Image (cartoon, rainbow, N blue to C red):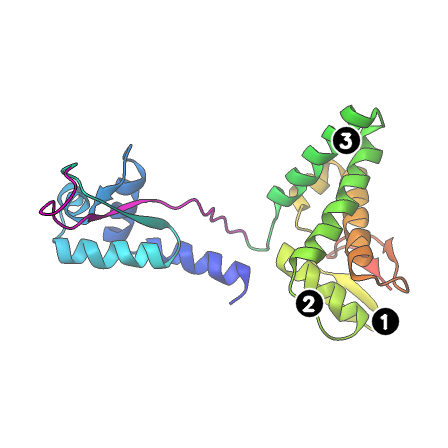
Amino acid sequence: MDDVGAQLSSVGVLAEPARRALYEHVVGQPAPVSREQAAEAVGVPVHSAKFHLDKLVAAGLLEVEYRRLTGRTGPGAGRPAKLYRRSEREVAVSVPPRRYDLVGEVLAEGVDRAVRDQVPVDEAVRGAARQVGARLTAAAPTPAGSPLDRVGEVLRPHGYEPRVVDVELCLTNCPFDRLAADHVELVCGLNLSLVSGVLDGLGEADLEARLAPEPGFCCVRVA
């Protein structure tokens, strides 16, 4: 299952009303809660609460810890209770895919560079984007196929929706679309540098990323 599919599955788990009520109760508490506490708060049987809470854990929305609620330790203290708390995992779904977290990472790194190195912000952002692109390559599974396919496989999880057309890699979605609508030059330059960083990371010296804006596509193509 791809990242979008996994995110959709996690959100879909909350469609069941009792499960959503249990989730909202758990994340609204200042400390982890037991299934008995959650069941009483929401008004469902304990066995039903256990079923739904464990579904939320399996979906990555809640996490579990074990602790004795009495505070007693040693022999005779009883078994630790299973407690539920909010997961540290972040779930955000948009269709088509948007990755404002990724562009935020690039922009924050770019501003840090601009301040530290006393260079223009646009230059610093392009440098940061190229470095982030190389980092995406290092973090990705080793891609297979033709050079264009390899580039596409690195970009696919980040919302670009790559497609090889003739001898070019086209990106049929801009993951920063809303930002690009108001800041075309900044975001297109950032996209170009990020994709160039992916080429650097893959060692694809025979490929080149270029700006080729066209309606319905991201502004960057690779050939």
Extreme-right residue of the structure: 206
* Closer to the eye: label 2 or 1: 2
Q: Which mark is residue 113?
A: 3
User: To which quarter of the image does residue 111 belong?
Assistant: top right
| Residue that carries the numbered disc 2 in the rendered image | 142
* Closer to the eye: label 3 or 1: 3
Q: Residue 32: where, in percent of width, then height?
A: 27, 40
Q: SS class of the residue under badge 1?
A: loop
Q: Residue 128: where, in percent of width, then height?
A: 76, 40
Q: Which residues are magenta?
A: 72-94
Q: Residues within 10 Å of mark 2 (few under 14, many from 20)?
A: few
| Residue that carries the numbered disc 1 in the rendered image | 167
Q: Residue at 34% x, 53% y: name it.
A: 14
Residue 32 appears in view: yes
Q: Given the image, on which type of amino acid does mark 1 rest?
A: Val
Residue 219 appears in view: no
Residue in front for this viewpoint, 186 or 117: 117
- Badges 2 and 3: C-beta atoms under 8 Å apart? no
Q: Earlier in the sequence, mark 2 or mark 3?
A: 3
Q: Is residue 123 above or below residue 9?
A: above
Extreme-front residue of the structure: 75
Q: Residue at 28% x, 57% y: name it.
A: 54
- Report the Cα–Cα distance between label 2 and label 1: 22 Å
Q: Residue 59: where, in percent of width, then height?
A: 38, 57
Q: Given the image, on which type of amino acid does mark 2 rest?
A: Thr
Q: Residue 62: where, in percent of width, then height?
A: 34, 49
Q: Residue at 67% x, 46% y: name it.
A: 177
* Quadrant location, the C terminus: bottom right
Q: Is residue 12 above or below residue 149?
A: above
Q: Residue at 81% x, 49% y: name it.
A: 192
Residue in front for this viewpoint, 185 or 87: 87
